[in-house]
């Protein structure tokens, strides 16, 4: 059981890092002065947010692995391959929500600060990286905490492609044991242990690091 929850933790950590990176890039695209980049960012977010996560995860298995032969660098290790495919699917899905959270933070930064930075000769990427994003991240720690908690729970979908995380083990135990309520309660408590401290810590950081206007 501890091994299954450890897989869940790994899925969450790797997916969270990937989602933060890709979501930040998408947010930069959505506020970019280049129409093509804005269009791509907007289309990606609107399309991916409206596709069920299960469909995305199954596509990474049936589509990328079985049809296109993408092995994610683990040709002979199917467990590792499907783990990485699950991370890819979770990143692709969660990044859309991370993008919108960060974009809402960008909108809280006074326009005058960006204009002043541009007047000093800074490029768009410099204005975004040095002036806007540092303040935006501080203002959206709370929303990002909610996305992280949702991501932790969404890792259960990886069981659909055979990743041996907590939900996969729970399904097997319920099929083999008669104590359905007890097994469900144990795994529910496990997810509470994973998500509750995360939410409390990040909400405390949100208040601690909030930008005072």
Image (cartoon, rainbow, N blue to C red):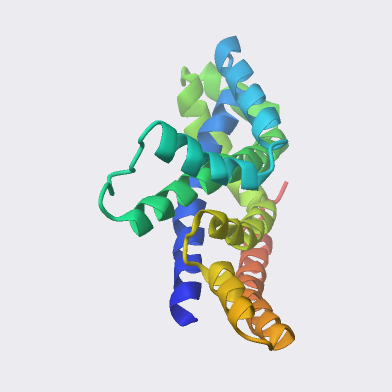
Residue 59 horizontal/vertical position (percent): 54, 39
- Does the rendering let one see residue 129? yes
Q: Residue furthest top?
A: 35
- Kindly identify the residue that appears in the image at 25 percent across and 52 percent down: 76
- Kindly identify the residue that appears in the image at 66 percent across and 60 percent down: 206
- Kindly identify the residue that appears in the image at 71 percent across and 34 percent down: 107
Q: Report the side of 7 relative to 144 (left or right).
A: left
- Kindly identify the residue that appears in the image at 54 percent across and 48 percent down: 90
Residue 64 horizontal/vertical position (percent): 44, 36
Pick whichever, 121 or 148, lies toward us: 148
Identify whether 151 is placed above or below 136.
below
Residue 126 horizontal/vertical position (percent): 46, 27
The answer to which image quadrant residue 204 occupies is bottom right
Pick whichever, 161 or 33, lies toward us: 161
Pick whichever, 208 or 189, lies toward us: 189
- Does the rendering let one see residue 134? no
Identify whether 162 is placed above or below 24.
below
Residue 69 horizontal/vertical position (percent): 35, 35
């Amino acid at each position: 059981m501890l091994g299954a929850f450890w897989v869940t933790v790994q899925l969450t950590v790797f997916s969270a890092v990937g989602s933060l990176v890709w979501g930040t890039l998408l947010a930069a695209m959505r506020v970019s002065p280049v129409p093509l980049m804005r269009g791509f960012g907007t289309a990606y977010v609107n399309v991916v947010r409206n596709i069920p996560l299960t469909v995305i995860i199954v596509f990474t298995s049936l589509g990328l692995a079985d049809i296109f032969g993408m092995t994610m660098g683990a040709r002979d290790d199917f467990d590792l391959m499907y783990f990485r495919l699950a991370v890819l699917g979770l990143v692709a899905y969660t990044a859309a929500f991370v993008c919108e959270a960060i974009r809402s933070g960008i909108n809280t930064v006074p326009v005058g600060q960006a204009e002043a930075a541009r007047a000093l000769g800074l490029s768009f990427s410099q204005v975004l990286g040095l002036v806007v994003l540092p303040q935006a991240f501080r203002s959206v720690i709370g929303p990002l905490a909610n996305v992280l908690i949702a991501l932790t729970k969404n890792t259960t979908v990886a069981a659909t492609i055979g990743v041996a995380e907590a939900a996969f083990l729970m399904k097997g135990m319920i099929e083999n044991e008669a104590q359905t309520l007890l097994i469900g309660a144990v795994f529910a408590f496990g997810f509470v242990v994973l998500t509750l401290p995360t939410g409390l810590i990040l909400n405390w950081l949100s208040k601690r690091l909030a930008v005072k206007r």
